[in-house]
Image (cartoon, rainbow, N blue to C red):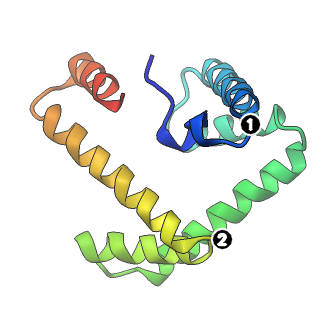
């Protein structure tokens, strides 16, 4: 199984043990949601995962409201960036989405890091298909 993303690195947390417990709890909830949503794809899978994850949250209604707010922000960003292509569109979406965060610079740095990771994975897995591609992506995500 792949390692947790750097965003969940608990070594720098105020209470590393509590952080690890939260991370493990979230990971278990995600695995449970994946099992419940097995066999679904696309928008149906997205809705299923949201429903399953929010059902396990301490305040399911607040969770659903947060997800809805994020979806609305994404839709507004898409509208603001309509007509742009390639790097220009990506940069526009990044600025629109991060402008609404508490720390826009940190948001953009995280997005840039994830984009670089995706580029590395694409390069490492170039030319592979099917199960071989999936295995390569999982292996390179670590």
Callout 1 touching callout 2 (CB < 8 Å): no
Closer to us: 118 or 32:
118
Q: Secondary structure at mark 2?
A: loop
**Residue 112 rendering spot, x and y as whole percentages:** 36, 60
Q: Residue furthest left?
A: 127
Answer with left or right where residue 72 lies relative to residue 52: left
Closer to us: 3 or 132:
3
Residue 85 visible? The answer is no
Answer with left or right where residue 58 lies relative to residue 8: right
Closer to us: 42 or 13:
13
Q: CA distance from mark 1 to mark 2?
A: 22 Å
Closer to us: 24 or 32:
24
Answer with left or right where residue 83 lies relative to residue 106: left
Mark found first going from the N terminus, 1 or 2: 1
Q: Quadrant of residue 35?
A: top right
Residue 18 visible? The answer is yes
Can you identify the residue that label 2 sits on? 102
Query: Which residue: 60% across, 24% down?
Result: 34
Q: Quadrant of residue 52?
A: top right
Which part of the image, by quadrant, shows the N terminus? top left
Can you identify the residue that label 1 sits on? 15
Query: Which residue: 54% across, 44% down?
Result: 7
Q: Secondary structure at mark 1?
A: loop
**Residue 130 rendering spot, x and y as whole percentages:** 24, 22
Between disc 1 and disc 2, the foreground one is: 1
- Figure label count: 2
**Residue 74 rendering spot, x and y as whole percentages:** 56, 67
* 61 lies above or below 3: below
Which part of the image, by quadrant, shows the C terminus? top left
Number of residues whose C-alpha sits closer than 10 Å to that of mark 2, classed few (under 14), some (14–19) or many (20 or more): few
**Residue 97 rendering spot, x and y as whole percentages:** 53, 71
């Amino acid at each position: 199984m792949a390692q947790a993303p750097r965003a969940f690195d608990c070594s720098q947390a105020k209470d590393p043990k509590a952080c690890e417990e939260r991370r493990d709890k979230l990971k278990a909830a995600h695995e449970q949601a994946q099992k419940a949503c097995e066999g679904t794809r696309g928008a149906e899978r997205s809705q299923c995962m949201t429903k399953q994850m929010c059902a396990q949250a301490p305040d399911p209604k607040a969770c659903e409201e947060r997800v809805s707010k994020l979806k609305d922000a994404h839709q507004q960003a898409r509208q603001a960036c309509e007509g742009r292509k390639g790097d220009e569109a990506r940069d526009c979406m990044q600025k629109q989405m991060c402008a609404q965060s508490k720390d826009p610079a940190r948001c953009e740095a995280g997005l840039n890091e994830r984009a670089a990771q995706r580029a590395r994975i694409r390069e490492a897995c170039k030319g592979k298909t099917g199960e071989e591609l999936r295995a390569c992506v999982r292996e390179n995500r670590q």
